[in-house]
Image (tube, grey):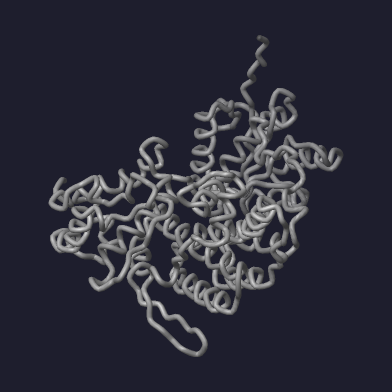
Amino acid sequence: METKEFRIPKVFISYSWTSPEYEEKVLNLARRLKTDGIDVMIDKWMLKPGNDNINFMEKCVKDTSIDYVLILLDKGYTEKANKREGGVGVETQIISKEVYEDVDQRKFIPIIFDRNENGEIDVPIYLRTRFYFDLTRDDVELQYVNLVKTIYNKPVYIEPKLGPPPTWLEESTNDVVLKFSINQNKNEEETLNELLCNIKGSKFGERITDVDKVKIASNDIEIYNKTIQYRNLLVDIFFNSCKNENFLDNVLDFFNNLKKWIFKKQGYEKEIWSLFMHESFIYLIAVLQIKRCYKEIFILITKTYFLNRDGQTAECNSNDYFYNTCDGILNTAVKIADDKNYYTGVGNLWIKNVYEPKISKAQLVAADLLIYNLSIVLLDENTQWYWFPILYIYGSPYNNNELLFKEFCFKLKSKYEYSKMIDLFGGISSENIKIKFRKMQKIKADPNDRYRYSEAFERAYLILDYIKVDEIASLN
């Protein structure tokens, strides 16, 4: 295999003898370039007593073996160059001639090396239109790196390969603009309001009537799948904004306004948007768990929600607010379309259409199980029912989707890990949280209290399936 011959780059440094301190600064740059493999020609190293300094500079500027001439600019250099004084003046006559005669030449590299007493840069008249590096800026290290890349003839900015046409060409303009807003980290309140407007303006068409049940079922699934684009946009917002100060307020406002709008809907349209809200809530918990926003998860699970229907306001918990029974038209449609008696048609559809790679199946299953477990531990003792994790069946040990939730449970044994997750339980100490877990202990002991699909052998997993109450925060 043929290899390209490597050539050590060679540069000459042109500068002004402004002061001993400045000359030492110049030498420091020369030393650094030398350590980075660049052969540096500078009078301090090359001239011997009795040598003609001006003759040396003239030869270096004209030497064809020298790849670049680095012109270090300060007030003193600029004044001498403009007045054609001293050695700088001689170099200026030679360099300016070549610059003017060949506007495309790249041998001469101006470098801002010092600023005047007013903090301004001084550039000789003949170099004012040239591109320069500025080693006086705050990003001096970046400037230096780019200078060295230029000397080695390496691109400072690598041009990307030509990609395929954008996937959004066939999408509606509103959806595309919304995606751009999210990617640019636009204020999440504005973006969520924009998303809600798009949801309210969406037109999915009516359910079809046909003698063919499979055809009807497929159409019902197709209608629901049109909500996936909005779910994905919402998840993008969650990821981009969950660390922001007002994130939770804005998200709760979004869901509150969405819930009010859903109440006004009827039939299948009401069902699909209720399912959308249910699924989106699981994704929200998944994102917050990934980002370790434990305090926000605690608030979402434990806060009181208010439902306003027909002028009447009712209080409810997170289960009643976000949960949908998932046993309606869509659930049946998935089973008919696939001709399989799934434990849950809706759950199967959610797992099939999981937003990968942003969220994995295991992360979604773990989030659903986390909501279930936290509803047991954190909600009021008089709570009538707990969150049923419809995705638990997809967390089987046989498909590895269980491992993430199991790992979370094992971490609770560690005092260190519990201290990191303490906000998930409302800041309750490890001793007091054990009292809360007694309720789960009773549920675990009574098979009739365990949640499961009536046809399934496996039950929804509890934290106490993997650890004992006394093991919480028991290890260092």
- Quick one: 375 or 342, which is closer to the camera? 342
The image position of residue 251, as x and y in percent, is: 49, 70
- Quick one: 45 or 229, which is closer to the camera? 229
Question: Residue placed at 60% from the left, 35% from the top?
Answer: 148
The image position of residue 352, as x and y in percent, is: 55, 46
- Answer above or below: position of 467 versus 289: above
Q: Of all residues shown, which one is farthest toward the right?
A: 101
- Quick one: 80 or 24, which is closer to the camera? 24
Residue 19 in view of the camera: no
Question: Residue placed at 48% from the left, 84% from the top?
Answer: 308
Question: Residue placed at 54% from the left, 63% from the top?
Answer: 276
Instruction: Classify residue 388 by image quadrant.
Output: bottom left
Q: In the drawing, does residue 258 fall left or right of residue 126?
A: left
- Answer above or below: position of 303 versus 369: below
Question: Residue placed at 50% from the left, 46% from the top?
Answer: 341
The image position of residue 13, as x and y in percent, is: 62, 36
- Answer above or below: position of 321 versus 56: below
- Quick one: 393 or 229, which is closer to the camera? 393
